[in-house]
Amino acid sequence: MAIESLEVIHDPLKLARQLLCLAYLKLRTRKDVSREHKRLMDAALSRNVERATALLAEHYQETTRICMEAGLCVSEMPEAA
């Protein structure tokens, strides 16, 4: 996961897409990302695996749904040239 994050930094298109998605989330939704992240952190720090897993899945699904609705995420990776 950390390696994928580093790859995003070095791929301007991926970085731009993620930044657009974050901007859309902040401006167009009532999604409280800070609250979601705190709940995830609390579950992880309390070693509540089931809760952390459920919260993370919910967080990814909702974020992906919002980004896809905004046309900011792609469902498939383009093939290498």
Image (tube, rainbow, N blue to C red):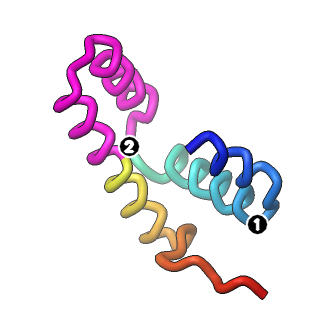
Q: Which residue is mark 1?
A: 13
Q: Quadrant of residue 6?
A: top right
Tell me the distance, in whole angstroms, between the alpha carbons under discs 1 and 2: 26 Å
Q: Is residue 24 above or below residue 72?
A: above
In the rendered structure, the answer to whether residue 30 lies left or right of residue 77 reads left
The amino acid marked with disc number 1 is Leu
Mark 1 / mark 2, whichever is N-terminal: 1
Give the overall secondary structure of the magenta segment.
helix
Residues rendered magenta in the picture? 30-59
Q: Quadrant of residue 78?
A: bottom right
Q: Are marks 1 and 2 in contact (CB under 8 Å)?
A: no
Which residue is nearer to you in this view: 3 or 31? 3
Q: Pinpoint residue 12: horizontal percent, then vertical percent.
A: 81, 61
Q: Which residue corresponds to the image point at 55% horizontal and 44% vertical from the top-left? A: 1
Q: Pinpoint residue 14: horizontal percent, then vertical percent.
A: 70, 62
SS class, disc 1: helix
The amino acid marked with disc number 2 is Arg
Q: Is residue 55 above or below residue 39?
A: below
In the rendered structure, the answer to whether residue 24 lies left or right of residue 52 reads right
Q: Quadrant of residue 32?
A: top left
Q: Which residue corresponds to the image point at 73% horizontal and 53% vertical from the top-left? A: 7
Q: Which residue is mark 2?
A: 30
Q: Which residue corresponds to the image point at 42% horizontal and 49% vertical from the top-left? A: 29
Q: Which residue corresponds to the image point at 27% horizontal and 20% vertical from the top-left? A: 43
Badge 2 crowding class, 10 Å Cα cut-off, few under 14, some 14 to 19, many 20 or more, is few
